Amino acid sequence: MPRIAEARPPAEPSSPEQRARHVRILRAASHMAAERGLERVQMHEVAKAAGVAIGTLYRYFPSKTHLFTAVLAEQVDRFSESAPRPRPGTSPEDAVGELLVNASRQLLRRPALATAMLQSANAANAAAVADAGRIDNTFRDVVLRTLGIETPTAMDVTLVRLLMQCWYGVLQMSLNGRMAISDMESDVRLASRLLLAPRSNA
């Protein structure tokens, strides 16, 4: 009786050459999704555009969910590194609102890619797609940093999680054409004020 192949976790790049291939794959996927949308991106075309074998692509990214969740994780990492400091005189919760509005504007510059990333990240199971947890942790950390909270309480973590869920929801509605961008930004700012008001350092 033939053995059923065991599911293997995606490989992680461990050398400069592997990291370069990994980056080429993410860039190729981003470019294609921005032009075509998630459904029309084919894995073999991503491999060809990135100059890697299809087996190499699947070794790093077993599915499109893995691939576009990783694309979002890379963008979130860059956003975390480049996030500006709050303007003097801005309340912490308003600073978080502006942070999320800026993140929204960056994502909405390429709506088809933003939709591909959010759909993939929302479908990703954290047990199978490690980048899903990485996204959550990075966003949590950048919000807590903007709030000036170094040692968050359980309530702080919960409030940030609720804010992230709210932000994903209104961003998705904007991408679906069900909410004007100006309304989305107003909702994000209001949600930040309401949800973060009970934080530990208020």
Image (tube, rainbow, N blue to C red):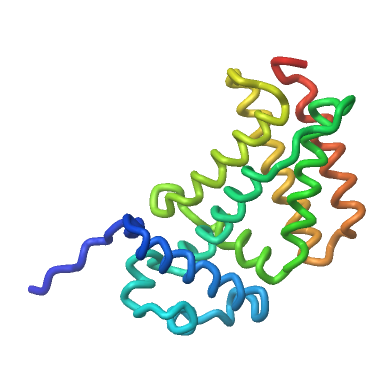
Residue 57: quarter of image: bottom left
Q: Is residue 202 above or below residue 16?
A: above
Q: Nearer the viewer, residue 22 or 143?
A: 22
Side of 124 where 181 appears, left or right: right
User: As drawn, is 184 to the left or to the right of 151?
Assistant: right
In the rendered image, the quadrant that contains the N terminus is bottom left
Taking the image as shown, residue 31 lies to the left or right of residue 43, namely right
**Direction top: furthest residue:** 201
Q: Residue at 85% x, 39% y: name it.
A: 189
Residue drawn where x is 65% and y is 48% of the image? 79
Task: Determine the image quadrant of residue 114.
Answer: bottom right
Residue at (75% x, 57% y) in the render: 106
The spot of residue 69 in percent (x, y) is 53, 59
Answer above or below: position of 52 versus 94: below
Work out whether 45 lies above or below 89: below
Give how far across and how far down residue 87 sits, in percent. 85, 32
